[in-house]
Amino acid sequence: MTNDMSDDLQTRIEEAVRNPRNLGEMKDADAIGTVGSADCGDMLRMWVKFKEEGGRKVIDRATFQTFGCQTAIAVASVATEMLAGKTVAEAQSMSGEELAAPLGPLPPVKIHCAQLVEGALRSALSGETAPEPKGNRSPTSPTLLSQLNAAQPADRKVRIVLDS
């Protein structure tokens, strides 16, 4: 990868991280998917809401939360923008590379970020995991942070520190 390409990619990632789209939990989601490993620290959860459009069930919107690097945030942000208006079949057919395409080609060491987003999307669309009850989340429903902390040794809990 040339320096110009890597600088351009870095600029796009930084912009997506500065202004992430569709970040956060969706209380009225129709589907939820979570992938990742607490052991390596990369986890991503995606919420999907559907609507009827022209007699077809399409994605109205998608949101995400992640414990991952800047590239994971950037890929999830651009991917959630791309999903609006897609049918389940269209979204399921998208590869991680396609979901990350607006950022440009990712270096090999960052391909896993796109695969993480693809996995969360496929998990949400597969119907294998039941969504949390709408508007009535029980106090014992696991959050992404509680799932990550549960997998950590008691003396290694995750703390979130916001950079200003």
Image (cartoon, helix red, strand yellow):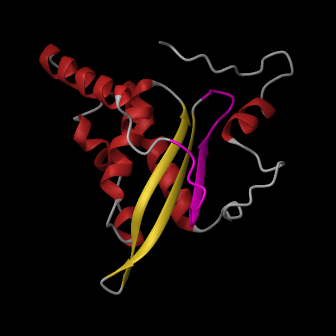
Q: Residue furthest right?
A: 154
Depth check: 45 or 39 in front?
Answer: 45
In this picture, is 161 found above or below 146? Answer: above
Residue 159, percent across and down? 69, 19
- Give me the residue at 47% from left, 12% from top: 164
- Give me the residue at 55% from left, 66% from top: 126
Please check the rendered image and state whether residue 30 is part of the magenta-colored stretch, yes or no.
Answer: yes
Residue 139, percent across and down? 82, 48
Quadrant in which residue 146 is drawn: top right
In this picture, is 28 found above or below 153? Answer: below
Quadrant in which residue 44 is drawn: top right
Main structural element of the magenta stretch: helix, strand or loop? loop
Chain part drawn in magenta: 24-41
- Give me the residue at 32% from left, 31% from top: 16
Residue 62, percent across and down? 45, 55
Residue 67, percent across and down? 57, 31
Depth check: 11 or 135 in front?
Answer: 135
Q: Residue furthest bottom?
A: 55
Quadrant in which residue 123 is drawn: bottom right
Q: How many marks?
A: 0
Q: Residue furthest front?
A: 135
Task: Locate the N terminus by quadrant.
Answer: top left
Please check the rendered image and state whether residue 31 is part of the magenta-colored stretch, yes or no.
Answer: yes
Q: Is residue 80 left or right of residue 44?
A: left
Q: Is residue 93 left or right of residue 157?
A: left
- Give me the residue at 31% from left, 27% from top: 13
Q: Is residue 44 left or right of residue 139?
A: left
Q: Is residue 104 left or right of residue 158?
A: left
